[in-house]
Amino acid sequence: MHSCNRNLAFSLDDGYSLLYFQNDYRSAQIGGTPAPKAHNFELPGDRAQYAPDRPADVKHVRLDIALDFERETVSGTVYTTLSALYEEVNTVSFDAVELHVERVTLAGREQEFSTDDKKLLVTLDRPYTHGEEFTLAVEYHAKPRAGLHFMKPVPEDPTRPVHAWTFGQPRYHSYWFPCHDAPNDRATTEIVVTVPARFQTISNGKLLEVIDNGATKTHHWLHDIPHAAYLVSLVVGDFAVIEDSYKGIPVTYYIRSDRKDDAPLYMGKTPEMMRFFSEYTGVEYPYSKYAQTVVEIYTGAMEHTSATTHSFSLVPDQKAALDFDLVPIVAHELAHQWFGDLVTCRDWPNGWLNEGFATYFEQLWGEHDQGSDYFKLSMLHDKKAYLAEDSRYRRPIVYHVYYSDGFELFDRHMYQKGGWVLHMLRHQLGEKTFRRGINAYLNRYREREVITADLERTLEEVTGRSLALFFQQWVYSGGYPAFEVNYAWDNEHRMAKVRIKQTQKVDDLTPCFVAPVDLAFTVPISDKAAKDEHTTETRAVSLCVVVGEDGQAEQTFYVPLEREPVMVRFDPDGWLLKTLKFERSNSRLRYQLAHDPDVLGRIEAAEALGEQEDEESVKALAHSLLNDAFWGVRVAAAEALASIGSEQAQDVLLQALTRLDAREFSRVRAAIAEALGNYAQPTRPELAQRSATALASVFEAGDVSYLVEMATAYALGRTRTAGAVEQLVKHIDRPSWMNRVQGSIFAGLAATGEDRVVEIIAPYLNDPTRHPTLRLAAARGFNVLAQNRHLYSEEARQRAVTALIEAVEHDSWRPVRAASARALQQFGEERAISALESAASRELETAVQRVMRVAAHSLRSGDKTGEQLKQLRKDLDEVREENRKLKEQLGALEARMK
C-alpha cells in the first residue's frame, strides 16, 4: 500500500499466542534482554499484540454474493473450507464486524452459532481432528461502514460515477464478509458476484464466466494461488478500458471514461516495470494478469493480488504530469506483487517486509528509469521524511505495541526506514550478492508468511555473512547514528586526519552503531595542480572504515596521501542512514559544489553554504542555481540562498525566476518562488515588497506548472505585504488539478497573519457541498494558520478552532478529519480535547483514529497550563498590535517620501 502522494519538489482472535511469540522471539527479546520500548509512540490503551491462533487452516474461500447499489448492501453466502490444525477442533471463530448472520451450515446441516459486533463463533457438529477438512457456509447480509464502499454522485461531487470497491488492509474485510482477517493465513479465493448488468467487475485472478440474468449479470472470478484475506479485491463499475501486455500476460487499466487519456501518464510504464522487477529479483511476475483500477474518493493505492486499486487523486492531468512525481506509486504497488502478495508478512509488526521492500523497489525502478542522480535524491527525500517522524517519536521497525489493528504501524519507520535498511544491505552485501539473497528469499517463502528472522536467516545462508548485529541495531532497535566529522591535514607527514564521533544519545532504544563507512579524498595529481584552487586535475582515493567497533563513539583515522586533498567526503554515495555535521572551509565547500561529480556531494555543499553569508558563497550558489546539470542541486541552491536571506541572494533568485525555462525547470522555479517567500514583513519591508511584486506577477499570469502556481501563492502570503490577501482571494476559485493550487492559496492566506482570512477559509472547510479536495485544502490551510497562530488575535484563533472541531466531528471524508485533527493539535487549544477523544471513539478508519488520539494526548499532556497559555497569547496579541502600528507608520512615511 502507498499511503500518500509523492512530490519531490516540496514537501480471527486478538488473544496472545505463545507459539507465535516464540517464533518471533528475536523481535521480543534480543541477546537475553527485553526488547527496547519506543519513545513517544505508545498512547494510553496501546498493548502488545501478536499474530492470532489458527485452530484450522483456511484452504479456500468462495463468496457467492449480490450487491444492492440502491441500499448499499451486500448479501449472500460465504463458503470457507478449513483443515484442522489442532489435534481436535470443536469451534471455529471468524472475524465478522457488524454482519447480520442468518444461518450457518456444514454439509447441508445447520450449525449452532453466536455473534457479537466483531465475531462469529460456530460450534461444529463434532470434533474434527488434525488434517480433516470441512466447509462452513455462512449466509449473511450487511450494510458495511468499512471494507466495501459504494460510490455515487453527491452534491459536493455530482460527476462522481456509480461504482463500488473494497479495501481490506489491515483488517477491514470482516466488515463485509466473515473471514480470518489477519495476514497469517492464506487461501485460494473465488468470487461469484451479481451486479447491475451495465457494470464491469474486476477481482483477483481469472474471470471464468459472466452469466446474463437480464437486469443483472453474475461474474465468476477465481484466484488459484493462496493469498491473505486482506488482499481480496472486488471493484464494480462502468470503466473505460485500456489494454496492454507483458510477455503475453494481460496488463489492463480501468478508469472513468472522461479521464481515459490521462491514464497512460500514470500507469503507462507498467509493462516495463514488470520486466525490471522480474529481472532484478530473478522471479517472474507470478500471476496470470495484472489489472489496475482507478476509483473515486479513496486516497492512496492498494496492492491486491493481481489487481491493484488506485485513487483518482493519483492520476495527473497533462499539466500536473509535468512535475508531480506520481509514477513511483505505480511501481510501489507493482513491487508488492512480489513483496507482500507472493510473500506476505505474518503480522503487521513485521509489515516492513511488505512496505519497506515496496518502498525500496520503487526507488530501484526510479534508478533504472531516470538514473542514479534521481535515485540518490529520492533516497535523500525518504531519509528526510523518516528523520522528521523520528523527531516526533522513535520506535524499532519491528514493534508489537499498538492500539487496534496495527494501522498506526504503517508509518515512515515501516516505509522509509524499512527501505533504507534494504539500501544499506545492498551496499554491505554487494549488488550481485544482494540480488541473489532476494531471489532466495522469494523462492524459499513463495506463497508463505514471513517474519523478519526469515529474511535474516536466508541472507545469512546465501551470503555467508553474519547479520545478527545489523538486524539488531537497524530493525529491532531505534534511531540512527548522528555523526560529527572533523578533518585536518598534517603537511609534515602527508597525512589526512579524520575524526569521527557519534553524538546520538545511546540508551536502551538507540545503540552506538557499528557500520562500514566510505571515506573519499580528491587529490591533485601534481604540485602544479595543487596550487590551482579550481583544478580538475585530480584523482580519487577512497577507503572503507568501520565506525562504532567495540562501542567506540569516537574514532580517529589517519590516511597517507601524496598531497593535501581539495575535497573530503564522508559516506560519499549516501549508503548509510545518518545525519552528518562536517565543518569545512567555505573554499572547500565551494570547490565541492562546483566540481563534485556526485549529486549528493553538491547538495551537501549547497546546504552547508546556506549557513554562510560571504559574497563568494552567494556567487557559487548563484552559478549552481543557473548551471548545475541536475535540477535537484539547483533546488538545493535556491533553498540555500533563501537561508542566507541577503539582498544579494534575493537578486540572484529574482533573476533566476525569469531566466530559467518555464517547462524544463518548473521544479527549480517552484523552489525559487518558495525561497522568495522568506523575505517577509516586518523585518525587511523593502525586500519583502520586491519578492511580493515578482510573485504576484507570476501568480496573476498563471504558469505552465501547477507546482509553480502553488509555490507562488504560498510564498506571496508569507511575505505579509499589503494587498497579498486580495491577490490570493481573487483566484481562489480558479480551477486546478485536485484543488492543489487552492490548497496553496489557503496556506498563503493563513501565513499573512490577517484575522479576516479565518472567515475566508472557514466556509470552505465547513460547507459539505464543497468538493472533498477543497475541504481538505481548507483544513490544511488552517494547519498553516495554527503554525502562525502568534500572528492572530484570540478571537480569530478561537473561530478557527471552532471550524476545525466541526470538521473533526462531522466531515464525511477521512483525510479532512485527519487534517483537521492535526491542525487542532498545532493550535494547542484544550477545549478541542473532548471533541477529539469523542471523534476517535467513533472513528472506523484506524489511521485517522491514531491522528485524533495523538492530538488529544498531546493537548492533554501539554507542558503549559491554561493560565500560562492565556498569558502567552495576551503577550503575543500585544506584540501583534505593536507590529500593526509600526506597519501603519512605515506606510505613512513611504507615502510622504513619494
Image (cartoon, grey):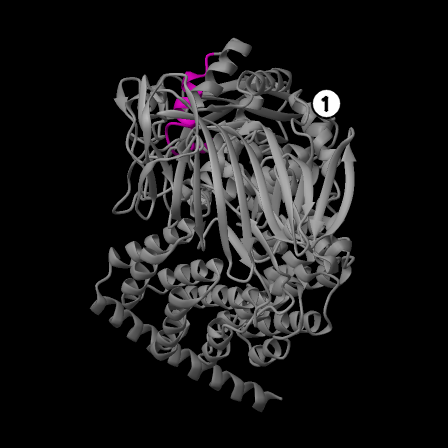
Answer with left or right where residue 400 lies relative to residue 488. Answer: left
Question: Image quarter for residue 90?
Answer: top left
Q: Amino acid at mark 1?
A: Ser
Q: Relative to the observer, which residue lies in front, 282 or 419?
A: 282
Question: Image quarter for residue 305?
Answer: top right
Q: Residue at x 65, y 26 (%)?
A: 286
Q: Residue at x 57, y 69 (%)?
A: 154
Question: Image quarter for residue 699?
Answer: bottom right
Q: Relative to the observer, which residue lies in front, 114 or 253?
A: 114
Measured as percent of width and height from the top left, residue 303 is found at 58, 39
Name the image quarter holding the C terminus.
bottom right
Name the image quarter holding the N terminus.
top right
Measured as percent of width and height from the top left, residue 704 is found at 75, 62
Measured as percent of width and height from the top left, residue 109 is found at 39, 33
Task: Give the residues in magenta.
Answer: 466-485
Answer with left or right where residue 425 lies relative to residue 737. Answer: left
Residue count near mark 1 (Cα–Cα under 10 Å), binned few <14, some 14–19, many ≥20: few
Q: Does the magenta portion include 808?
A: no
* Residue at mark 1: 526
On screen, residue 261 above or below 277: below
Q: Can residue 804 be seen from the camera position used here?
A: yes
Measured as percent of width and height from the top left, residue 273 is found at 71, 34
